[in-house]
Image (tube, rainbow, N blue to C red):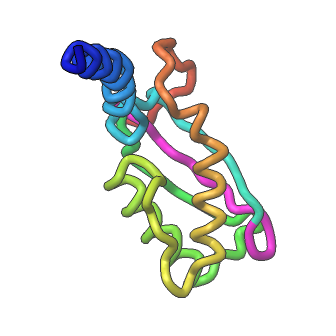
């Protein structure tokens, strides 16, 4: 009788866990983004940091950032270049660390990306934004 209960528990676990595993495999960061050009901002030093992301074929292919007032410093560029490389490589912000020496701007870029997250996730509908070719 004990074996019957064990098999039933195993069956229930399989029924519950397999759909979760399938969902985890389709999580953002694996090329499931909606094609288009997206923009969002977050507070930064001096003024807002505006982040623009281009998605093509379900993958982020370009990430740029600028300061609303145009007052970018060498630390700003250091953060922008480092964060862009890390996010584009990972295809997500999860696990991406801030750039040492440019933590403030790095944090602003991550915050803008988090605001953009819902826009980027593929929803099966065509996006009307034009994509740079």
Q: Which residues are magenta?
A: 44-58
The single residue placed furthest to the front in the displayed view is 1
Task: Give left or right: position of 10 versus 54.
Answer: left
Task: Give left or right: position of 46 versus 76.
Answer: right
Q: Which residue is at 31% across, 32% downward? A: 25
What is the quadrant of residue 58 in the picture?
A: top left
What is the quadrant of residue 19 in the picture?
A: top left
User: Where residue 100 appears, x then y in whole percent?
Assistant: 49, 83
Task: Give left or right: position of 107 versus 90.
Answer: right
Quadrant containing the C terminus is top left
Q: Which residue is at 60% across, 53% downward? A: 51
**Residue 121 magenta-drawn?**
no
User: Where residue 44 appears, x then y in whole percent?
Assistant: 74, 69
The single residue placed furthest to the left in the displayed view is 3
Task: Give left or right: position of 129 versus 22.
Answer: right
Identify which residue, 128 or 103, lies in the foreground: 103
User: Where residue 61 appears, x then y in whole percent?
Assistant: 37, 45
**Residue 53 magenta-drawn?**
yes
Quadrant containing the N terminus is top left
Q: Which residue is at 32% across, 29% downward? A: 21
Q: Is residue 38 above or below residue 36?
A: below
User: Where residue 106 appears, x then y in whole percent?
Assistant: 57, 70
């Amino acid at each position: 009788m004990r074996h019957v209960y064990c098999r039933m528990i195993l069956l229930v676990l399989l029924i519950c866990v397999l759909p979760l595993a399938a969902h985890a495999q389709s999580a953002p960061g694996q090329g499931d983004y909606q094609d288009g050009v997206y923009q969002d901002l977050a507070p930064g030093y001096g003024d807002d940091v505006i982040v623009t992301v281009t998605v093509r074929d379900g993958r982020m292919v370009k990430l740029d950032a600028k300061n609303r007032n145009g007052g970018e410093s060498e630390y700003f560029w250091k953060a922008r270049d480092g964060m862009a490389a890390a996010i584009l490589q990972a295809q997500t912000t999860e696990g991406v660390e801030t750039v040492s020496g440019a933590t403030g701007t790095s944090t602003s870029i991550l915050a803008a990306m988090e605001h953009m997250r819902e826009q980027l996730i593929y929803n099966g509908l065509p996006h009307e934004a034009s994509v740079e070719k």
